[in-house]
Every structure is written in C-alpha cells, then in structure tokens.
Image (cartoon, helix red, strand yellow):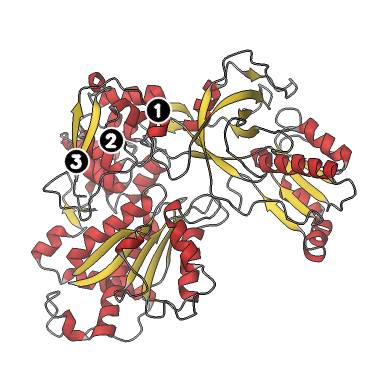
Amino acid sequence: MRRFLLLYATQRGQAKAIAEEICEKAVAHGFSADLHCISESDKYDLKTETAPLVLVVSTTGNGDPPDTARKFVKEIQDKTLPADFFAHLRYGLLGLGDSEYTYFCNGGKIIDKRLRELGAQRFCDTGHADDCVGLELVVEPWIDGLWAALTKHFMSSRGKQEMNGALTMASNGSWRTDPMKPELLHIESQVELLRLDDSGRKNSEVLEQNAVNGGQSNALVADCESSLTRSIPPLSQASLHIPALPPEYLQVHLQEPLGQEESQVSVTSVDPIFQVPISEAVQLTTNDAIKTTLLVELDISKTDFSYQPGDAFNVICPNNDSEVQNLLQRLQLEDRREHRVLLQIKADTKKKGASLPQHVPEGCSLQFILTWCLEIRAVPKKAFLRALVDYTSNGAEKRRLQELCSRQGAADYNRFVRDARASLLDLLLAFPSCQPPLGLLLEHVPKLQPRPYSCASSSLFHPGKLRFIFNVVEFLSNTATVVLRKGVCTGWLATLVESLLQPHTCASHANGGRTLAPEISISPRTTNCFHLPNDPSVPIVMVGPGTGIAPFIGFLQHREKLQEQHPDGHFGAMWLFFGCRYKDRDYLFREELRRFHKLGILTHLKVSFSRDASAGEEEAPAKYVQDNIRLHSKQVARVLLQENGCIYVCGLALS
C-alpha cells in the first residue's frame, strides 16, 4: 500500500472533515493515508519524511492560519533554516477560505509559500476552495485529481514495479511518466477509478442510486417548484452519485444527573478565559436606523487581561435557548436534558484514528453541551446529509437528502442549504421521518466557536475597561418556513444588556451600578499586526465604514493620551475615512470624532453617507468611502508613497 502523510490545520473542523474524507477514500485508490492534526508534531517528522505530504489548511481571523497551526508556522518561519531544509519533500496543499474576506485562503498560502522557500516541491497544483461560493466546487475536483497526482509521483519516484499488486492494472500497463498538464489529472483519476474491481467500487465515494419519486408522478413533480424538501426534473429523475457513508465512531451513554454546577469554563480552550461584568451599554444608532449598533463596556479591572488598540478578543457565547429546546424536543430527548453525556469510541468502528471530540466536556449535561459546546446553527455539510439518509424512513425524504448531498444536486444544496443558512434543526423539521442518534450529531456538528470583536477603546483612555461595538445581526432563514433569526452572539448580547441599555442620545458614562451587572466570558486572541506604528511620527490612513470604525476609536483615544503625555513630541497626521447610511441615524461616534478633529488629534475626517441625498461633511459629498478616497487620492498617495505612511482597513467583507 502506497503511504502518504496527511496533515490538517483546522479552526472550525472543516479542514479536518475534508482530510478525513481524503483518508477514507484513499484505500479505494490503492493508498494509505497517515492522518494527523498539524499540531500533533510528536506523531510525524517532516525533516525525515520520505512519503509525499498532503495538507488541508483553513484560514481564520484576519487571514491567519488556524490556532492549531500556530506552532507549526512559527517553526517553519525560523529564519535560520537553510534554503534546502525541505528539499526532500514533495507536497500538495488544499487551502480553504472565503473570498468575502480580504486575505483569501491566506492560512494555506503562508504555509505553501514557506514550504517552497525551504526547497519543498509540489507534486500537484495547490487548490484554493472558496466558502463564499461553495467549497465543494474546488474540493471535489481537487481530491479527484489528487489520486492521479499521487500515482504519477509514485511511478516517477519508485518505478513501475512497486505499483504491481497495489492495483489491478490494465494489461498494457503503460503509465505516463512525462509531465502532466493539471487539467488531465482529473481524467486520469477517473481512468484509474474504472480499473478498480467490484469490491473497490463498493467502498469508493461513488454510489449509483436509481431515481425514486416516492410514488409521485413525473407530471405532478414537474408542476412544482423545487424547494428544500422537493426537487423537479431533471434532478428528480437523475441517477445520483452520492458520497460514501462516513463511518460512525461515537457511542453515547446518558446517565442520571449528579446535580453539579456547570459553567462556560468547562468548555475547552487553548487560551485563558476571564469572566467579567458588563459595566455599560449604549445604543449608538437611532431606533429608525436599518441596523441597531450597540456599544458594550466590560470591567476588566479585577483581571490581568490586557490589550492594545487594534487588538481583538473572543466572546464566549451560548446558542439560543429556544433553539436548544426545540432541538431537544425534535430529538425526543427533552426529558433527558439534564442527563450527563458520556462518550466512548465504538469498538467496531471503521474510522481510522477515531478520537473523542475535545470540545465536548466529559460528564456535562446534554443541555449544557447543546448550549455551550456545539454550533447547532452550522450549515450541515454534505457528509452529514449523507449520514442522515440512513436514518430517514420516508422514501421521498430519503431521496431528497440523497439529491442534496449528490454531485448532481450541488446547485440545490447551495441554494436550499448553504445559501439559506439551513441548520440541523431546520433539516430535522423539514424531514420529519429522519431520526438520527445523538452520537451522529456529536460526530458531525462542529464546535461552537467564540465570536471575535475588535477592541474599541484604549486602556490609557479607559483604565480597567474594555469597549467593543457590534450590529445586532438579523436575517431571514428561508428553509421549510421563513424564520427571523438574530446572530448567535449579537442576539444574546443584546438581550443580556437590555436592563443596562442607554439610548443613543445619552452621554457615554457609567451607569453608576443601577442594576446588577451581567457577566460574560472573554478570552484573548493571538497578537496581530493591526497596531499603531511604533514611531508616532508616521502618518496613518484609517478606513472604517460602519462598525469597522471600532479599532480606530481606540487608536484616536490612545493618540490623545500619548500627546498629553508628550506635549513636545512629533505626531504624524491621522486620516479617517468613515461611511454609513444616514448622517442622523447611524453616524457612529459622531460627537467623539468631531472632538478628536477639533483637538487636532484627527487631522482629516472624511465622512460619506450612502443614503442621504446631500449630507456631505464640510466638503463635496461622497456616497461611499472609496469615493471619498478617490476625491482625496493625491493626498492619500502622498502620505503612503512619499511619507511612508501606513494604511489600515477594517470592515465587513472588505476586498
């Protein structure tokens, strides 16, 4: 069996799931995958590795590699390593990202670039999968091409003899050893697949399913529009290629509750967790604004939590309580919500390297796990849908789930599951005959991630305090029924601060302890490069539409205190390009910005309003921040190119 080393660097479990899929498919293609998380450096050694290396790497934060890859990236970025350190390595890399963010697939690109700098060579082209349009559009053909690329690698490096016995080859046995064009990799992989015997085909990712219409006539189906629960021709009449069934590996035992107290600290984390009270909450927008923006101030004076302007931090949040209760009810586990969940690996599992999920604390209640540990809002992946098929008794529902996880049904999956933000609960309500066991959910539902927020204050300006701002996210989930939902974290925070909340017209001062302050749990995030220059004389340009202004408030507060401490110091110019919809509804920090401008801290304030006909500040109006930057392009170019200034951009989905 031809072995390759398979490493994954995951943040939310997506890269791990794809790596496990590769591992499970490898056997059917005559390979053996040695699968490890990239953080498990005690289980592999790239310095002595002779087998080809395959990496699946996600991206998190501001284009960073995932937390599990921190140590690996730090080690390979050691400047003392020689240029031929990895000259013996041949590798292939699949990067995961989202093109809505500025640094698309940057986690994978960082590792890819550094491996090549150290002499490693690719045996197949790097893939960049985009979650914005659907990861599977790149992931599936990349995996298909991987088998041909691995075959070509082994043929060229070890000779044709080593291949004998690994697969039943065609009688002519003439394999290509000349350089192959990337577009031919997929074709050759399909040729190799055709050579597999019947037992190999049974275990492969391709399963042929005959069309079943659940007793409905084709004419009746053709008259209907497609939906989450119903398809129309040609999909409803197609033979389907569906993924292989993921092997189950968790055994769940529910035991009587012990009555012990549970807290968020039980949730595993690589970072320290601080429980801090909310000391203030202010609504920054008017009630008729399209979005509601809140400012929340945390009291960190009794902790050793520290931050710089520009830093971000994590808020540890729970799932919506009503959604948890509805899920328990749908799973028929409502009367066992307080039972303790004990997990074991199934003795007869066929899953290679099966391990207990680290994000599920041992002995915690079922309700606690669904509330604090699992991302129950996560959009189910195709592998999960495939697993649900086998627990669905109704023929029409089973067929529809098969369609949604099939290659032929990719467009329907994107439209009715991914783009509609369908959750596990949505699917279970839409397919009432589906009765999955709890263990299957714990295998497929990813970890509930903490939500990152930018610090919107300076500790010099607000000692012992940490401020942040956010829009209360609201969206329609249009699955089987139309439901208005709030963001998991922003909706929870908005409810939590209701008793403290001041209207946007109030001055931003502490509440004086009028009500008992609610507490939340926070954790620091990895230090980033989004900080003020060490040299205060360097001019800076800040671009922050909407809540993207948050870190720049911290910058301005910090600069004000530095100038007070060093009245004779030389401080560079500070430009701010801010944009919102309406001058009188959602101009965040308007009075503060005008004060900074009046004091000369903020030397250039350029504001644009996208919905006001003519509400420009002092100068000619501009609709968006980019229009304002264009109006002042000569000055901005001078700051950046002639004065060696720095530019900072913060905002949602900026590219």
Residue 240 - label: none
Residue 344 - label: 3
Residue in front for this viewpoint, 343 or 97: 343
The numbered mark, 1 or 2, whose residue comes first in the sequence reads 1
Q: Residue 544 is drawn in which quadrant?
A: top right
Residue type at tag 2: Glu
Q: Residue at x 80, y 49 (%)?
A: 574
- Helix, strand or loop at mark 2: loop
Q: Residue at x 45, y 81 (%)?
A: 84
Q: CA distance from mark 1 to mark 2?
A: 13 Å
Q: CA distance from mark 2 to mark 3?
A: 10 Å
Query: Residue 95: x, y in percent?
Result: 43, 60
Residue type at tag 3: Gln
Residue type at tag 1: Ser
Residue matched to label 1 = 263
Residue 615 visible in rendering: no
With 143 as the anchor, is 500 left or right in this view?
right
Residue in front for this viewpoint, 458 or 304: 304
Query: Residue 242: x, y in percent?
Result: 23, 52
Mark 1 burial class by Cα count in 10 Å: few <14, some 14-19, many 20+: few
Mark 3 burial class by Cα count in 10 Å: few <14, some 14-19, many 20+: few
Q: Is residue 101 above or below residue 296?
A: below
Mark 2 burial class by Cα count in 10 Å: few <14, some 14-19, many 20+: some
Query: Residue 631: x, y in percent?
Result: 81, 52
Residue matched to label 2 = 362
- Helix, strand or loop at mark 1: loop
Q: CA distance from mark 3 to mark 1?
A: 23 Å
Query: Residue 148: x, y in percent?
Result: 28, 73
